[in-house]
Amino acid sequence: MQFTIDNASNRPVYQQIVDQVKRDVALGRLVRDDKLPTVRRLAAQLVINPNTIAKAYRQMEQEGIITTKPGAGAFIALLDSNLSEIVRARIICERLEMVIVEAFHLQVQKESLREWFEKALEKFKFSPEKGLKNE
Amino acid sequence: MQFTIDNASNRPVYQQIVDQVKRDVALGRLVRDDKLPTVRRLAAQLVINPNTIAKAYRQMEQEGIITTKPGAGAFIALLDSNLSEIVRARIICERLEMVIVEAFHLQVQKESLREWFEKALEKFKFSPEKGLKNE
DNA sequence: TAATTGTAATAGTTGAGATAGTACAAGTAT
DNA sequence: ATACTTGTACTATCTCAACTATTACAATTA
């Protein structure tokens, strides 16, 4: 897996690591039990302090993205969100609205926004749609 | 206009101010030439240092959301994004993908996401769709 | 057994965010 | 004109997250 750090970004380095792993999982480029680079190797590769990488791994473990085993390494975990539907909806809707507000002020047309959303949605490997029981 | 500050949030206070103004503009609750509270009044009301409010106003002016006139006050400005279509697309698409990745890891169904997106989109006062010239 | 791995802990630096206070120029109200 | 209000500018100080540097430890691997 290829990592890139943008030092000009205001986003913390450890967060950029997390972002990229989560993105690759969603893209299907990383699947369960895939091994991540070791803390020390990745730190050396990115010329970054190992503590920063460790912080990223710690957060990913807390979010349930990976499982870590001292001596072995860090591995992609099974997808499992224990949050309630209500909480998940609140989180995502709030973030969706933030993006829409941003788009509004950039004077993006509603239709462009829809188009970009659908195009982005296609990129990721969502589990197959449920039953489609017509309600 | 009613402002609320969440001290528990990791989002900076001045940014929360900006967020709320931009949101109200997108909702149509604030329109051109509407007057914002004065820096000192809002600071007193929110029990916050005037410098923090000033910083929010400074950023909004830079983003073109408002125009400020010493002695008069701060007013909602005309919507006008000078960014190219390419740049705007890049900004919004990147942010859309971030939300989608987040939703993926929360195991949100693709259909729920679509539904929430459309519902959120309806909340805001986008300018009427352009010609709809069928291409 | 020796090397590797993630983790923990301490100490120090840097920069953003926020507070506190003062001063100034431009607009408003009288 | 005068007094007040307004946004801005500036300096100083404080706090905290992010990052670096270094060492040490326990679990796994070879």
Image: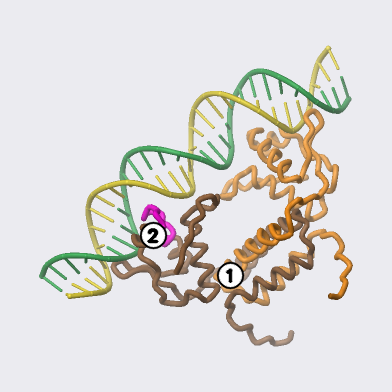
Chain colours: A orange, B brown, C yellow, D green
Amino acid type at circle 2 is Gln
- Residue at 64% across, 67% down: B89
State the extent of the magenta-drawn residues as a range.
B45-58
Q: Chain of mark 1?
A: B
- Name the quadrant containing residue A66: top right
Q: Nearer the viewer, mark 2 or mark 1?
A: 2
- Name the quadrant containing residue D21: top right
In this picture, residue A10 sits left or right of residue A85: left
Residue B90, how many percent across, how many down? 64, 64
- Residue at 48% across, 65% down: B63
How dense is the environment of label 1, judged by Cα within 10 Å: few (below 14), some, or many (20 and up)? few
How dense is the environment of label 2, judged by Cα within 10 Å: few (below 14), some, or many (20 and up)? few
In this picture, residue B22 sits left or right of residue D13: right
Which residue occupies the foreground of this view, A76 or A48?
A: A76
Q: Which mark is residue B45?
A: 2
Residue C5, how many percent across, how many down? 77, 30
Quarter of the image that includes the C terminus of chain B:
bottom right
**Residue marked by disc 1:** B84
In this picture, residue B4 sits left or right of residue A115: left
Amino acid type at circle 1 is Ser
Instruction: Say if A33 sits above or below B27 in the image.
Output: above
Tell me which label, 2 or 1, sits earlier in the chain.
Answer: 2
* C-beta proximity under 8 Å, tags 2 and 1: no
Q: Magenta region, mostly helix, strand or loop?
A: helix
Q: CA distance from mark 2 to mark 1?
A: 39 Å
Secondary element at image label 2: helix
Residue B47, how many percent across, how many down? 39, 54
Q: Which mark is residue A8?
A: none
Task: Please check the rendered image and state whether residue B52 is part of the magenta-colored stretch, yes or no.
Answer: yes
Q: Chain of mark 2?
A: B
Residue A101, how many percent across, how many down? 58, 68
- Name the quadrant containing residue D13: top left
